[in-house]
Amino acid sequence: MVLQKALDREKEERVSLVLTAVDGGEPQMSGTMLIVITVLDANDNAPVFTQQTYKATVTENSPKGTVVATVTASDADQGSNSKITYSITNTLDGIKKVFDVNMENGEVTLIGNIDFEDSRIFQINLLASDEGGLTDSCKLVVDVQDVNDNKPEITIMSKSTVISEGAKLHTVVTMINIDDKDSGQNGKVECFINENIPFTLKTSANNFYSLVTDSDLDRERASDYNITVTCSDEGVPSLSSSVTLTLQISDVNDNAPVFERSSYEAYIVENNTPGLSIFTVKARDADWNQNARVSYILEDSSVNGVPVSSYVSVSADSGVIHAVRSFDYEQIKDFQFHVKAQDGGSPPLSSNVTVKVMIQDQNDNPPQVLYPVQTGGSLVAEMVPRSADVGYLVTKVVAVDVDSGQNAWLSYKLQKAPDRALFEVGLQNGEIRTIRQVTDKDAVKQRLTVIVEDNGQPSRSATVILNVAVADSFPEVLSEFTDFPHDKEYNDNMTFYLVLALAVVSFLFITCLVVIISVKIYRWRQSRILYHSNLPVIPYYPPRYSDTLGTGTLQHVYNYEVCRTTDSRKSDCKFGRAGSQNVLIMDPSSTGTMQRIQNEKNILDEPDSPLEQKPPNNDWRFTQGQRPGPSGATGGPEVAMGTGPWPQPPTEAEQLQALMAAANEVSEATATLGPGTMGLSTRYSPQFTLQHVPDYRQNVYIPGSTATLTSNPQQQQATAQQAAQQALPPPQASAQPEPPKAAQTPASKKKSTKKEKK
């Protein structure tokens, strides 16, 4: 048997043949035989997968050993040729670390951890091989299903740890980024913060949130905030995460200091020690640090016109109020002032509080007796008749105490009361009354000592002494009370005042004496200076001149006087002051009058001039028998009256005596110049010379006499009488005529001049 074509066991595994053998005979004879041919398998078929691509789904985080899928391959061969083995052919992507395939049954199992966030799909290449080396391949696509296994991630992008309490609304505090690796509903995140805080979250972009202020901040309510941001996804079960932010609120000086009380009252006992602590004011500031540092300042004010700073002071740091002075309740009972509390912010804030200080009284004043008045020389204060009934009101002691309260409650009692006391004093009212009838044995003079005590601790008292006379008549009282001793204290005070008055009077007397001596010495020195001066003869021209005739340059009867300096010893004339009281104030600018006087050249000559004085006219000369005066002529009373005849021409001694008298008057006039008179500058002016002296023929002064002769017969007698009234001594002294003076020598002239100056 020869095989004509290939056999295929997979098509026909056994072939049955009937073999017939035919002979050549006729009838042919044949024989048959069944031949069964068994086709043996040959490895001519490769394994074939049922699917070229398999798909499987697995959830992330599945445990190891989880069968992901099962792949199947078939082989038409038989026997060993049909035995298939499975394998994974991936080499670079690490599939073999995550998945494994069973070589015999083709089960793909999970041998590693899978994470949806890392790999969402796996592609596994599988190979089926028979023992003959024939193979077939397929793909297994494994989809990883997401599981909500990731919490939302919160990332702080910008963070502020401090924010001012004065920040505006919607101020951004922090920016937050939220990320969830899950997908779908598992990746949807919602965020929120804790309640009751002045902040809120706003979504600015996808997965971005901003934390902003939602209301005004107040550091005094909350100085810091712990803000918890919580984010949750929508997975099942939901996962969430949170983060806590600590935010400090910085201080702004928006709170003024506040005192613990709206007003304060402090008490201090009078007569305190200066510097004593009275009270402490306290103010608190709700701000922080420097803004809360409180300083205390005493506001400027006055108490009874005195600055309050002279009463109290305030410690700037502690607020302790100290007394600056010692207080006296009797002068000031209470006062109030303002204290300002100021913080250290910028700008500073402040508040005021009123502090009232109450002075508490001390028993530092004894009672003062108003009645009866105690004097050192008083004798009888009251008188009680002997017929006085029991309870007769003698007097009442009135006393006051400037203290207050119990310190001013007064009680009265007798200090010394004899056994048979006649009087008693009311304890509260101070009334002194009789407690029994007056008897003959009672003394006329009664001396009562009343003690007035206050109710203070310790108690203070005052004593008053009353003199009471028990008598019916005033003379009896006088006879009994004349021997009452005077108060010693009064005598001591009187002695002191007398000594003080004597000392004051003595001091004033010595002071006046020194002043008078000083003035006299000063005038004497001034006169000596003028006497020894070598100035030329310059007339003194005072503002009063005498013109008894009324025929000169003056318009009416005026007084005027011309004097020369002490060096004008050669001058033999002096013009005296007349009796008229009319006064003319001469103006140096009156050149017209000066010119008329200058024309009278026969009045005076200069000391060094060779010209001599002209003799007087004969019309007013008298005979020798009619000439009175010191030249030797005798006369009766008419000579003394200045009405006698003209004397003989004066001798040289008389001329010198007149000159010295003129010099003395010049020195006195110089020392006593006052307002309205010509000063030295005017007298020594070149305009005033001897030619300004008026004509002496109109008014003649007789040396040694106060009489003035004139050439006018009508005025001569009136002028002589007026001069006599001024010059003559009293009538009893003018009875005897004055003897003529002896002629003086040059030495005696100087002595007489000095005596006159002194």
Image (spheres, rainbow, N blue to C red):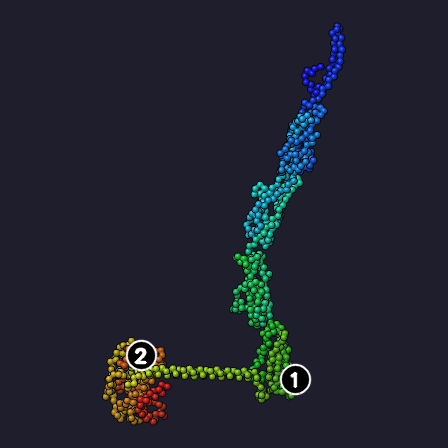
Q: How many marks?
A: 2
Question: Which residue type carries mark 1?
Answer: Pro
Question: Which residue type carries mark 2?
Answer: Arg
* Mark 2 or mark 1, whichever is nearer to me: 2
Q: CA distance from mark 2 to mark 1?
A: 93 Å
Q: Which mark is residue 683?
A: 2
Q: Nearer the viewer, residue 472 or 658?
A: 658
In this view, the residue farthest toward the top is 26
| Residue shown at 68% from the left, 18% from the top | 6
Q: Specify the quadrant of the image occupied by residue 717.
A: bottom left
Give the image location of residue 719, x and y in percent. Answer: 30, 86
| Residue shown at 56% from the left, 42% from the top | 205
Density class for disc 2 (Cα within 10 Å; few <14, some 14-19, many ≥20) is some
Residue 391 visible in the displayed image: no
| Horizontal side of residue 286 vs 84, given as left or right | left
Give the mark, 2 or 1, whose residue is nearer the N terminus.
1
